[in-house]
Image (cartoon, coloured by chain):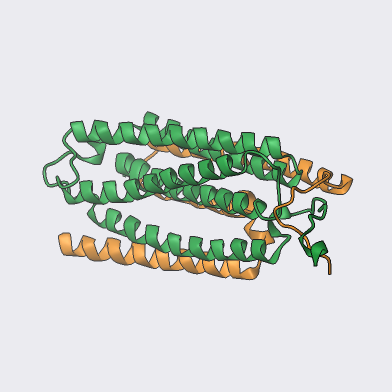
Amino acid sequence: MAADHAIERQSLPPDPQKATLEGRNKYLGFWFFLGGETVLFGTLFGTFLGLRSSTEGGPTAQDLFHLDLVFIMTMILLTSSLTSVFAVINMKRGNHKKLILWMAGTVILGAAFLGFEIYEFVVYYNYGLGFTVSAFASSFYTLVGTHGAHVAFGVGWITTLLIRYRKGGITLSNAPKFYTAVLYWHFIDVVWVFIFTVVYLLGVGG
Amino acid sequence: MSHVDPSAPLEGGPSKEEERKLKRESRSQLVSFMFMIFITTTAFLTVASDIVPTGFAIPFVLLLAGIQVVMQLYNFMHMNEGSRWINVMIWAGLFVAAMTVAALAVLIGIDKY
């Protein structure tokens, strides 16, 4: 019995995030969740597309949107996707220190993105785009705000992982946790690709 | 079967073959990242410049977004390496989302105009 509780030295498997049944279940379950999230954002995109020209005399997309700010935000989020990819590669190498560093980089870029988004909303609000000003305003803030809430949640999630697992190395139980957080982060990026295309580029050019 | 403690730090590094695979992956991810930056910049320039007619710009940037999303899903998120249920769930999700977008955009649009 005592042997059951002894810590056995476990060597690094090729995919530590999928080495245990629990890890594989987390991985599969998380993709199911992402399938549902896709539908959630689908409804918000559909609503925005239906209402985007109902500005009721308030500010329009052409009045408000500055593509240079959106471009910077897009580059920040794309780069944060790459840093999280490098985090996973270093996790597969068993390099705990680099995993933490690249994940911390992802958090910093995510927080920077969030800062820009808050700044953007404040500017629009001061320009007269309150949440209830027009159907365009409500659908815009709901769609982009829901994405922003996802970014904020992701930043919080990864930060707690970093605090919890700052020491002790990569284990079979924390590898799936980092991996699902990275999948979530990529998903946020996927949604943003549609937001900058449908909301901003089509808002300015369409 | 011996008991393995999942909270024990994993020891050692990847095998030589595994390390080669990871190096290759690193490189290919960097290349796809640069490609994504390129198509994103193209999309922004298409809309920002006045040379491209609107009728062409809209389907073009939507196409670029589609390419980028597939690259994210299959390259960064390794969707092809997982169970086939992953593909079923995501593509079903995308299908329902596309139907919802079309239905809502058209319905609210018709009601309005």
Which residue appears farthest toward the right when viewing the image? B16
Q: Position of residue A36 (x, y in %)?
A: 45, 64
Image coords of residue A203 (percent x, y): 30, 43
Image quadrant where one finds the C terminus of chain A: top left
State whether residue A30 appears in this view: yes
- Colour green belongs to chain: A
Q: In the image, what residue occupies the spot 83% across and 65% down?
A: B2
Residue A75 in the image: above or below residue A52: above
Left or right of residue A90: residue B14 = right
| Relative image position of residue A191 (x, y in whole percent) | 44, 50
Q: Is residue B35 visible?
A: no
Front-most of A112 and B13?
A: B13
Q: Position of residue A69 (x, y in %)?
A: 38, 30
Q: How many marks?
A: 0
Q: Residue at x 50, y 33 (%)?
A: A109
Q: Residue furthest front?
A: A2
Q: Residue at x 19, y 45 (%)?
A: A131
Report the quarter where the N terminus of chain A lies.
bottom right
Colour seen for chain B: orange
Residue A56 relative to residue B1: left or right: left
Relative to B58, residue A24 above or below: below
Going by the image, does B37 lie left or right of A122?
A: right
Tell me: residue B11, above or below residue A32: above
Closer-to-camera residue (A47/A167): A167
